[in-house]
Amino acid sequence: MTSTADAPAPATDPSAVLAAAATAPFGTVFGEVMSVARADASGWSEPALEPLTSFSLHPGTHALHYGSSCFEGLKAHRTVDGGIRPFRADKHAARLQQSCDRLLLPVPPIELTTRLIEMAVEANAAVTPPAPGSLYLRPTMLGTDVTIGAAAHPSHTAILYVLACPVGHYLPPRPLTIVVETEVPRTTPQFGVVKTGANYAMALGRIDRARREHEADQVLFAPGGIVQETGAANVVLVDGDLLVTPELTDSFLHGVTRDSLLQVARSLGWTVEERTVTVDECIEWSARPGAEIGLMGTAAVIAQVGTLVVDDRRLTLSAPDDGRLVELRRTLGEIQTGARPFTFA
């Protein structure tokens, strides 16, 4: 099996990479080594480390024409004992399996995906920033059959690779403005749980319009008035020790950060309700003194909503700057860096 001793030598001084990442947009500065495995009729290859460089795909590659691609997103954090630890890699590997299964792609064993993640972390350790920064990891699967006559057939070959990016904040460190969309869903119901690029592409037009018309940061998709998710995060409502979030359905992505924060909230003695959440309830929630609405996701972690735009009405939340969402984020951060012991179910 490949070890990090076999890793290609980076061409750039790690300090220069970290300096660039400190000011660059999220996900635009990369570590110089990626981990890779390939699937064909004989099964999966051994994981390997390769220099991060462009690789060749035939113009007729299945993923380029028929959408046979999916990915994951997770972070590795520097820990208080001097290590670097990917956060809940097994949970992300299981979700990647679910996406591959829905797309009829070769399904990578959890052990393979977690090994690729570990290899990418080890090979890019020198460009992992200290907290609150982290190393963002992007396991990516592409169907690689060469055919443009297979719209009704899956790809039986694939490549799985893991990119690494040193990152800071994903969203601006201020309360967010969110436009509520009640007519257009983010994605098709049967593909809501699949982390595939097409789902993000479907939401782009509505998010772009929200930015232009309302200077919004994101869109909360709530077709028929039933809250699902934003373009890249799950939704949470908090009032004192009460946390409410939409129950899981196939219409939206089952967030690992969501699952983690719910477990943390329960450990703190909070009441956690997973149930149907409506736009009307969000409107009512926004008027409660001290109540909070937030977004939960790997990149965002947990971000506070300051303004809801509903049918061109701007509703401002009066949540405190150091409220319960901040407490929840701080606690999760302590767990991720090993400062607070915690075992996830």
Image (cartoon, rainbow, N blue to C red):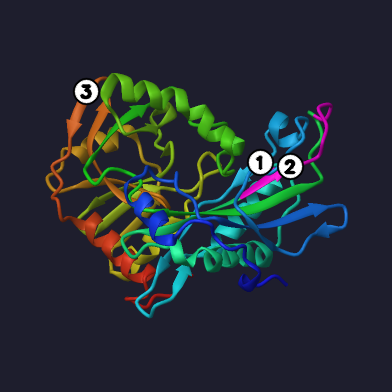
Question: Is residue 155 in view from this perspective?
Answer: yes
In space, the residues marked 3 and 1 are separated at their CA atoms by 38 Å
Residue 148 sits inside the magenta stretch: yes
Residue range (magenta):
140-150
In-image side of 175 versus 81 (left or right): left
Residue 106: image location, x then y, percent: 76, 51
Identify the residue at the far right of this view. Answer: 42
* Marks 2,1: beta carbons within 8 A: yes
Q: Secondary structure at mark 3?
A: strand
> Residue at coordinates 21% horizontally, 23% vertically from top-left?
313
The residue beneath circle 2 is: 143
Depth check: 49 or 118 in front? 49
Q: Earlier in the sequence, mark 2 or mark 1?
A: 1
Q: Nearer the viewer, mark 3 or mark 2?
A: 2
Q: Secondary structure at mark 2?
A: strand
Q: Is residue 240 above or below residue 304?
A: below
Q: Secondary structure at mark 1?
A: strand
Q: Give neighbour class at mark 1: few <14, some 14-19, many 20+ (Cα, 10 Å).
A: many
In space, the residues marked 3 and 2 are separated at their CA atoms by 44 Å
Residue 121: image location, x then y, percent: 52, 65
Residue 263: image location, x then y, percent: 39, 65
In-image side of 47 versus 272 (left or right): right
Res 276 → quadrant: top left
The residue beneath circle 3 is: 313
Q: Amino acid at mark 1?
A: Ser
* Marks 3,2: beta carbons within 8 A: no
Q: Earlier in the sequence, mark 3 or mark 2?
A: 2
Depth check: 166 or 229 in front? 166
